[in-house]
C-alpha cells in the first residue's frame, strides 16, 4: 500500500478504482511504470474488454445494417488479436518500462504508417482500422467507454488539474472522488465537488502509473491510499458506513424551519451550476437557490447559448423550485472560467481583467440576450437577477437600464415576465464594500461573494496553490468587510446574504447570524448541517 497526502477540498471517504483523466486533445503521456507485469495484465484486461465491445458491435451491425457492413467489426477483432500487433505493444512496455496507453498508441501509429505506405489499396485502407482499434484500446485502458472519461463504473478521478469546463462535462454519477496533483481548495472544481457531495483532494503528488488501481480517498486526512491491504480496506468501509449514518441523522433537520431559539430566521439557499444540480437542492431541503452560476451553461456549450436555450434552462429550474427563490447570476466568465468561443485576449492579470460584468457591459448584445431569457423565465417562478463583480454605481445603473430596455422589448412583443423582478448585486470587491451605502440604494439585495472578496481584499490569488500559507479564510479584514456590508444594506432596506464558500463554514455560522445576515447560500450538501447549528443557537 502506498500513501500520498495533499489538501482536502471536500471531506468524505471514497473507495474504488482510479481513472486518470483523459486529455481533451487525445494526447497520451509517456509514463514510466515500476511494475511491468501489472501493466501487461492491465493491457490484457483492456484487450478483453475491447474484444467484447467489438463482438457486441458486430452483432448489432448485423441486425441494423446487414452482414456486408458488419464485417468490419470482425476484421477489427482479427487485428486486435494479431500477434505482431500484440507483441509490439508488450515489447514497448517491457523494453521501455512505460504505460500501456503509450505503448498501444505508439504501436497503432507505427502500424498505421506501415499500412499507409503499402502499394496494395486494400492494405492502405487498413491504416485507419489499426488506428481505430488502438484508440478503442487506449480508451478502455483509461476507464472505458467511447471517447474517454465516459466510465463504465464509478471511479476516483485523478488529474493534474481540472478546469471548470472539463469538470462540467463529466458524468457526475460516475465520479467517486476528485484527486488533482495541482489545484487549490478554493477553485471552482472544489466547489463542484462540494455540490456533488464527493471527496476532493488537491495538491496530491500521485504518481502517473496509477490508472486502474484500487484506492481509498480519505477526505479528512487529505490522503490517497493506493492498493490498500484488507485491514485498511475494512477499516475505511466501516468509516464510510458511519459517515452515511451521520448524514442520515441530519435528515431529521429536513422540513424544519431555519430559526434560532430566540426566533431569528435565516434563509438557507443553495449554490448551483445548472439544471442538473437542482436534484441536490431538493434532496437536501434547500429553501431556494441563492446563486445559480449561469456561466456554466455557457461553459457546457460550443457556441453562445441562444435566448431560447437559456430561457428553457432557467424556466425549468424556476418551475421545479415551484415558487421558491431562484437567484440567477448573470454571466461571470473570465479569470479561471475561460470559454474559447468568446475569443478573449490573453491577459497578464486575468483576475483583475476582463471578466463578468465588464464583458457584459462591453459586449452588450450578449448581455441583452441573457437578460431577456431571465425576464421570460420570471413568468414561471420566483426569479431574481444578480450582477457579479460590481465596483461602481454606473455599472449597476447601466445594467438596470439595459434590463429596462429588455423589459420594454418583451412588453412590445406581449411576452410575459415579472415587472417587479428583484435585482441584486454580488459584493465581492473591496470597492463594492466601501460603496455599499450608495449601491444599496439601487438594488433589492446584496450577496457577498467571499471567494473573490477574500482574494481581492487580501491580494491573494484564489487559484495559486503556493500562497495557501498566507491565505486566511477567516481574515479579520474579510469579516469586517462582511459586517460593513450587512450594516450598509440594512440602513437602506436591502437584505444581505453570503454566497461564497465561507457561508457554509460551520465555525462562522453563529458569527454571521450574530452579524445580522439574512441569507446564507451554499453547496446543497451543507444545508442540513448549517440548519442544525442555527437551530441550536440561542
Ligand atoms: C464568490 O466569489 O464568492 C462567488 C460566489 O462567486 P464565484 O466563486 O463563482 O467567483
Ligand atoms: Mg466571484
Image (cartoon, rainbow, N blue to C red):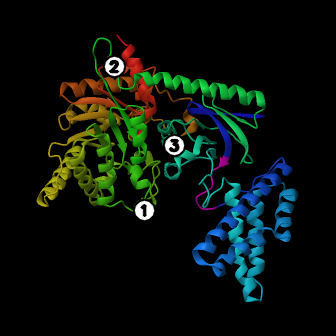
Residue 451 in picture, x, y percent from top left: 43, 35
**Which of the image's four quarters has the C terminus?**
top left
Q: Earlier in the sequence, mark 3 or mark 2?
A: 3
Mainly helix, strand or loop, the magenta region?
A: loop
| Count of numbered badges drawn on the protein | 3
Q: Residue at x 56, y 27 (%)?
A: 244
Query: Considering only vertical position in the picture, is 82 above or below 523?
Result: below
The disc placed on residue 189 is: 3
Residue 302 located left or right of residue 467: left
Residue 221 is one of the magenta-drawn residues: no
Query: Considering only vertical position in the picture, is 372 above or below 423?
Result: below
Q: SS class of the residue under badge 1?
A: helix
Q: Which residue is mark 1?
A: 341
In the rendered structure, which segment of residues is drawn in magenta? Answer: 19-26
Q: Is mark 3 within 8 Å of ligand 1?
A: no
Q: Earlier in the sequence, mark 2 or mark 1?
A: 1
Q: Which residue is mark 2?
A: 513
Amino acid at each position: 500500500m502506498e500513501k500520498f497526502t495533499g489538501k482536502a477540498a471536500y471531506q468524505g471517504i471514497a473507495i474504488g478504482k482510479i481513472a486518470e483523466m483523459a486529455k481533451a486533445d487525445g494526447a497520451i503521456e509517456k509514463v514510466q511504470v515500476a511494475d511491468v507485469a501489472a501493466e501487461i495484465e492491465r493491457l490484457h484486461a483492456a484487450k478483453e474488454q475491447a474484444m467484447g465491445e467489438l463482438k457486441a458491435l458486430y452483432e448489432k451491425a448485423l441486425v441494423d445494417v446487414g452482414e456486408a457492413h458488419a464485417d468490419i467489426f470482425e476484421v477489427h477483432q482479427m487485428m486486435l488479436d494479431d500477434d505482431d500487433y500484440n507483441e509490439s505493444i508488450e515489447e514497448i512496455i517491457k523494453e521501455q518500462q512505460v504505460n500501456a496507453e503509450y505503448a498501444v498508441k505508439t504501436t497503432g501509429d507505427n502500424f498505421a504508417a506501415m499500412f499507409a505506405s503499402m502499394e496494395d489499396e486494400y492494405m492502405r485502407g487498413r491504416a485507419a482500422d489499426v488506428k481505430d482499434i488502438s484508440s478503442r484500446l487506449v480508451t478502455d485502458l483509461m476507464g472505458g467507454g467511447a471517447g474517454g472519461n465516459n466510465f463504465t463504473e464509478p471511479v476516483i478521478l485523478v488529474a493534474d488539474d481540472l478546469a471548470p469546463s472539463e469538470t462540467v462535462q463529466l458524468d457526475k454519477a460516475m465520479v467517486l472522488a476528485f484527486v488533482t496533483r495541482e489545484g487549490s481548495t478554493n477553485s471552482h472544481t472544489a466547489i463542484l465537488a462540494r455540490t456533488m457531495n464527493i471527496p476532493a483532494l488537491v495538491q496530491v503528488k500521485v504518481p502517473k502509473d496509477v490508472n486502474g488501481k484500487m484506492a481509498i480517498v480519505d477526505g479528512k486526512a487529505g490522503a490517497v491510499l493506493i492498493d490498500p491491504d484488507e485491514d485498511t480496506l475494512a477499516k475505511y468501509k466501516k468509516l464510510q458506513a458511519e459517515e452515511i449514518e451521520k448524514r442520515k441523522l441530519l435528515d431529521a433537520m429536513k422540513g424544519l424551519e431555519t430559526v434560532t431559539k430566540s426566533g431569528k430566521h435565516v434563509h438557507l439557499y443553495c449554490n448551483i451550476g445548472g439544471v442538473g444540480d437542482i436534484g441536490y437542492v431538493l434532496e437536501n431541503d434547500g429553501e431556494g437557490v441563492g446563486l445559480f452560476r449561469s456561466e456554466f451553461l455557457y461553459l457546457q456549450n460550443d457556441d453562445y447559448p441562444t435566448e431560447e436555450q437559456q430561457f428553457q434552462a432557467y424556466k425549468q429550474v424556476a418551475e421545479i423550485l415551484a415558487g421558491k427563490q431562484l437567484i440567477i447570476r448573470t454571466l461571470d466568465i473570465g479569470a479561471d472560467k475561460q470559454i474559447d468561443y468568446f475569443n478573449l485576449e490573453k491577459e497578464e492579470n486575468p483576475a483583475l481583467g476582463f471578466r463578468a460584468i465588464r464583458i457584459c457591459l462591453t459586449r452588450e448584445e450578449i448581455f441583452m440576450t441573457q437578460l431577456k431569457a431571465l425576464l421570460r423565465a420570471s413568468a414561471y417562478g420566483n426569479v431574481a437577477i444578480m450582477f457579479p463583480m460590481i465596483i461602481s454605481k454606473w455599472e449597476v445603473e447601466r445594467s438596470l437600464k439595459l434590463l429596462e430596455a429588455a423589459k420594454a422589448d418583451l412588453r412590445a412583443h406581449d411576452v410575459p415576465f415579472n415587472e417587479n423582478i428583484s435585482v441584486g448585486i454580488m459584493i465581492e470587491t473591496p470597492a463594492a464594500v466601501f460603496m455599499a451605502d450608495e449601491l444599496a440604494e439601487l438594488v433589492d439585495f446584496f450577496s457577498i461573494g467571499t471567494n473573490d472578496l477574500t482574494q481581492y481584499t487580501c491580494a491573494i490569488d484564489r487559484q495559486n496553490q503556493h500562497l495557501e500559507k498566507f491565505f486566511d479564510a477567516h481574515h479579520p479584514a474579510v469579516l469586517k468587510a462582511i459586517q460593513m456590508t450587512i450594516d450598509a444594506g440594512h440602513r437602506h432596506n436591502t437584505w444581505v446574504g453570503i454566497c461564497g464558500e465561507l457561508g457554509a463554514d460551520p465555525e462562522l455560522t453563529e458569527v454571521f447570524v450574530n452579524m445580522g445576515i439574512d441569507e446564507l447560500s451554499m453547496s446543497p450538501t451543507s444545508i442540513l448541517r448549517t440548519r442544525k447549528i442555527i437551530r441550536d443557537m440561542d
